[in-house]
Image: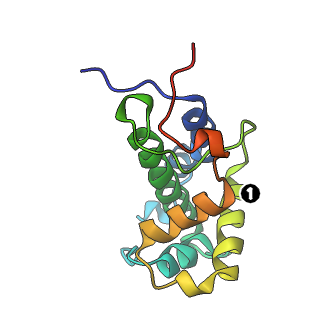
Amino acid sequence: MRPPALTRPALVCLGFFGAVPAAYAQNPPAGGQAPPASYHIRTLQDVVNLCSTPSSDPSYAGAIGLCAGYLSGVIDYHLADTARATGRTRRVCLPKTATTREQAVNGFVSWARLNSQYMAEPAVQGVMRYFINTYPCPAERSGPARRSR
């Protein structure tokens, strides 16, 4: 069985975060050290802390790379899980125009800080809550993904 082809929303999402791993690989922290092992993502608060790492922090590149990768992984899984063949309900419809990685991360952090009641939630639930609230599907698209002809 062939995996579903990437849909337009999935490609837009890749535009959000696609350059992060490559940029980190080309510019590792000084001394070639790996990022700290203290990146434990359990709650929404953990993701917000990671995504809020100041650019002056020596671990900034690794932290922002992991942040963007985590956000991208959550939304990519949702898009794959709600692909046409699955019949599952798509709850997130990304915009047709790509947002920069910085805009996407800043938008997530801003939303999370305004919705601090969710900070203790499991990370994936909090991130999905952000995407559902920020990029809801129109009523006609919130059902199972449809085939376009």
For the N terminus, the quadrant is top left
For the C terminus, the image quarter is: top right
> At 36% from the left edge and 74% from the top edge, which residue is drawn?
37
5 or 68, nearer to the observer: 5
The one nearer the camera, 51 or 71, is 71
Vertical relation: 106 (above or below) 120: above
Q: Is residue 55 visible?
A: no
Q: Which residue is mark 1?
A: 103
Q: What residue is shown at x 43% (from left), y 41% (from top)?
A: 82
The x, y position of residue 107, in whole percent, is: 71, 64
- Could you say whether the residue bearing mark 1 is in a helix, strand or loop? helix
Q: Is residue 27 visible?
A: yes
Whether residue 135 sits left or right of residue 67 in the image: it is: right
Residue furthest to the top in view is: 149
In the rendered image, the vertical position of residue 15 relative to residue 71, given as above or below? above
Q: Is residue 98 above or below residue 20?
A: above
Measuring 40% from the left and 73% from the top, which residue is drawn there? 41
Whole-percent x, y for residue 122 in the image: 40, 75
Above or below residue 80? Residue 45 is below
Q: Quadrant of residue 140?
A: top right
| Residue 103 x %, y % | 74, 57
Name which residue type carries label 1.
Gln
Q: Position of residue 38 (x, y in %)?
A: 39, 78
